[in-house]
Image (spheres, rainbow, N blue to C red):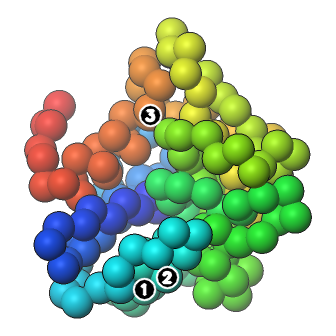
Amino acid sequence: MILAFDTYYFENNARTVCIQFERWNDCTITNFFEETISEIEEYKSGEFYKRELPCILSLLKSIDLSECEAIIIDGFVVIDDNQNDGLGGYLFKSLNCKIPIIGVAKNNFSKIEEFKKEILRGESKKPLYITSKGINLDKAAELIKKMDGKFRIPDLLKKVDSLGRNIDYSS
């Protein structure tokens, strides 16, 4: 199984959602998990992980990870070419470095050159930015590239984003 997470912030709360699917080219969600947490950390520049990581770890407590092939996050796994951890890197360490983490970011983070892969999907001229730990970066980029959907953002990643915002784009 593959898991994809997203967190949406409103007022002093965070709604974290996770979708489960079985194959990289799937278009169907096989399971859905959600949790809303109150009194979350304030955002601090350069320390985003301190806000979102507790939300993801809390939701992970309700998921059996024994068959988990990889986890996809919205953001970066590493934040520079020294491989300092971003949200995904801290998640990887929190899971004892046992489950590969793939970060998919919509916006470029200029401090990374070597440990970031740009991919184009569909007819988009704007890339997605892939980072990873526990899986080869080229392999991670290829897996995201082959995910279902005709557009820049894979359909299932668009779905997890809309579920986090509690928007249902049923298809």
Closer mark to the observer between disc 2 and disc 1: 2
Point out which mark residue 54 bears. 1
Question: Above or below — where is 39 with respect to 124?
Answer: below
Q: Tell me which residue sits at (82%, 43%) in the image.
A: 113
Say if mark 2 contacts mark 1, CB within 8 Å: yes
Q: Can residue 13 be seen?
A: yes
Residue 168, by quadrant, is: top left
Mark 3 residue type? Pro
Residue at x-position 64% and y-position 68%: 86
Is 95 positioned to the left or the right of 166 in the image?
right
Res 64 seen here: no
Q: Residue furthest top?
A: 123
Q: Nearer the viewer, mark 1 or mark 3?
A: 1
Residues under labels 2 and 3: Cα distance? Answer: 27 Å
Amino acid on which disc 1 is placed? Pro
Horizontally, is 18 left or right of 143 in the view? left
Q: Which residue is at a point 19% across and 87% down the rendered structure image? A: 38
* Mark 2 or 3, closer to the camera: 2
Q: Element under label 2?
A: helix
Q: Circles 2 and 3: CB distance less than 8 Å?
A: no
Query: What residue sits 34% from the left and 40% below the top?
Result: 158
The CA distance from mark 1 to mark 3 is: 26 Å
Neighbourhood count class around disc 1 (C-alpha, 10 Å): few under 14, some 14–19, many 20 upward: some
Q: Position of residue 149 (x, y in %)?
A: 42, 25
Q: Which mark is residue 50?
A: 2
Give the residue type at disc 2: Lys
Disc assigned to residue 79: none
